[in-house]
């Protein structure tokens, strides 16, 4: 009889959580989820700020080089490169009927003078890195193309709009009807072939965020431009244009970023001062 009583008392002592206790647990779980979400958002914002910081770093180095040597980095002649830095410019892979290699003509041929620009900037102690100025079949951030703090698989490169030996298959075509403007390009690198950062680096909403912060928030105007990455195709991926930026005509009007596309679809172009 005593055994049964003790068993009954034992059952009475077993009880579940109270509503107050469950509420506290749910609040703690909610706070943890909110913390993780806020942390992810802060990391994302920091990465976008790093793109802006890198852009400003390269822009300031580029401007300082031009004002110091009276020539664009990458476009310095062989004689001047030897005189100033004691080096010999790299050989050219560009065959162009309209532009000359290292001719001090303020035109940057992407496949040669773009990578060499980072080498010249590093020789002038304006940027860090292990740049060698060589055009290779596989681009390497911090060696052939400009490194980026945003991620290991993205990078920067210089080129001139509307010039032969251009990057991104633009060739001598205009870009959003612009020509002969020097660009700092930002995109994803290709480890198997040198497309010179022609793949997508940013979601459209993130590209818009940078454009809107520094410029006008419009992908086809101002000093910050954007285009679809080669890896995603050329129709309404990054922008509302059905085609790459080189196919744009004034009849296409003002474009917008495809902010609802929740995947990396954009490569960006920052127009330089010189």
Image: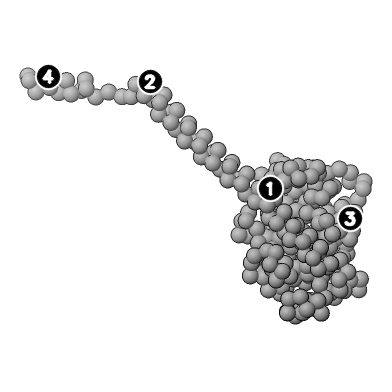
Which residue in the structure is indicated by mark 3?
178
Q: Nearer the viewer, mark 3 or mark 1?
A: 3
Q: Name which residue lies at 38% across and 21% down.
A: 20
Q: Name which residue lies at 7% across and 19% down.
A: 1
Of the numbered discs in the image, which one, if any, rests on residue 5? 4
**Disc 3 and disc 2 in contact, CB within 8 angstroms:** no
Q: CA distance from mark 3 to mark 4?
A: 92 Å
Q: In which quarter of the view is residue 116 placed? A: bottom right
Which residue in the structure is indicated by mark 2?
19
Q: CA distance from mark 2 to mark 4?
A: 29 Å
215 on left or right of 172: left
- Say which label, 2 or 4, has the lower sequence index: 4
Q: CA distance from mark 3 to mark 1?
A: 24 Å
- Say which label, 3 or 4, has the lower sequence index: 4
**Disc 3 and disc 1 in contact, CB within 8 angstroms:** no
- Say which label, 2 or 1, has the lower sequence index: 2
Task: Give x and y (percent) for residue 158.
Answer: 77, 63
Q: Nearer the viewer, mark 3 or mark 2?
A: 3
Q: Secondary structure at mark 3?
A: loop
Task: Give x and y (percent) for residue 97.
Answer: 91, 73
Q: Nearer the viewer, mark 3 or mark 4?
A: 3
24 on left or right of 253: left
Q: CA distance from mark 3 to mark 2?
A: 66 Å
Vertically, is 156 above or below 250?
below
Quadrant for the C terminus in the image: bottom right
Which residue in the structure is indicated by mark 1?
203
Of the numbered discs in the image, which one, if any, rests on residue 261? none
């Amino acid at each position: 009889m005593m055994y049964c009583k003790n068993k009954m008392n034992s059952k009475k002592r077993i009880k579940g959580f109270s509503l107050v206790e469950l509420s506290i647990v749910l609040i703690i779980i909610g706070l943890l989820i909110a913390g993780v979400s806020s942390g992810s958002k802060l990391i994302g914002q920091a990465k976008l700020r790093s793109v802006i910081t890198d852009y400003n770093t390269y822009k300031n180095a580029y401007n300082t080089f031009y004002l110091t040597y009276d020539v664009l980095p990458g476009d310095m002649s062989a004689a001047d490169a030897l005189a100033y830095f004691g080096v010999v410019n790299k050989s050219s892979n560009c065959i162009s009927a309209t532009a000359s290699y290292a001719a001090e003509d303020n035109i940057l041929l992407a496949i040669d003078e773009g990578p060499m620009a980072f080498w010249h900037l590093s020789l002038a102690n304006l940027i860090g890195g292990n740049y060698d100025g060589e055009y290779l079949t596989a681009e390497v951030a911090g060696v052939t193309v400009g490194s980026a703090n945003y991620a290991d698989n993205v990078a920067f490169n210089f080129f001139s709009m509307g010039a032969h030996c251009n990057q991104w298959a633009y060739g001598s075509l205009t870009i959003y009807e612009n020509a002969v403007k020097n660009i700092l390009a930002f995109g994803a690198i290709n480890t198997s072939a040198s497309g010179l950062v022609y793949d997508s680096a940013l979601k459209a909403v993130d590209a818009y965020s940078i454009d809107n912060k520094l410029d006008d928030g419009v992908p086809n105007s101002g000093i910050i431009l954007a285009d679809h990455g080669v890896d995603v195709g050329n129709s309404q991926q990054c922008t509302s244009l059905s085609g790459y930026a080189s196919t744009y005509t004034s009849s296409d009007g003002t474009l917008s970023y495809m902010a609802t596309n929740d995947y990396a679809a954009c490569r960006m172009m920052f127009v330089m001062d010189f």
